[in-house]
Amino acid sequence: MLIEGACHCGNLRYTLDWAPEPESIPARACTCTFCVKHGGVWTACAGGRLDVVVRDPQRVSCYVFGTRTADFHVCAVCGVVPLATSDIDGRLYAVVNVNTFEALDPGLLRHSSSDLDGETQAARLERRARNWIGTVRLRFADRDVVGAGEG
């Protein structure tokens, strides 16, 4: 299943190829203060492929906090956070914010919350490597692929 998503103004766009076809899509609301304030409800498909296109990279900021193990890609134009990435052993992993999905039946979403307080950095990176999208292509609209997490 192909899932399209974007920030509000379209500066950050992505296509997630969810494989195999899902019966439902987990939508985990993180309880950290950043995600609560930005409406972060995250999902990932470990077997999927994510293609991200950034129209204007100068209008994107990467916010890093806490364990400094993830970059939250924030559109500086509209303020939306459509994805977060984590570089683990030279491979790029990602999650996407279900609130940025376009034209997806909301009935497919299976909502829950996640509290990751107290998780060690090693456990966090292991969980991400196991559960996050492990094939990620990040491109700028005016340039070739900038970084890839193909493995």
Image (cartoon, rainbow, N blue to C red):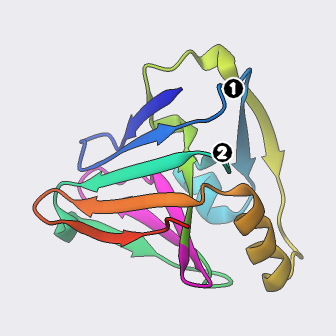
- Check disc 2 and report the residue beneath it: 45
Residue depicted at x 56% and y 37%: 98
Is 36 situated above or below 103? below
Viewer-nearest residue: 38 or 88: 88
Q: What residue span does the magenta drawing correspond to? A: 71-91
Provide residue 88's location: percent of width, then percent of height: 62, 79
How far apart, in angstroms, are the residues tagged by discs 1 and 2? 9 Å
Task: Specify the quadrant of the image occupied by residue 138.
Answer: bottom left
Q: Determine contact: label 1, label 2, CB under 8 Å.
A: yes
As helix, strand or loop, the secondary structure at mark 1 comes to loop
> With 23 as the anchor, is 11 left or right in this view?
left
Q: Residues within 10 Å of mark 1 (few under 14, many from 20)?
A: few
Label of residue 51 in the image: none
Amino acid type indicated by mark 1:
Pro
Horizontal relation, residue 60 to residue 27: left or right: left
The residue pinned by badge 1 equals 22
Q: Looking at the picture, tell me which residue is in the foreground, 47 or 101.
A: 47
Residue 57 appears anywhere in the view = yes
Please say if 95 is above or below 29.
below
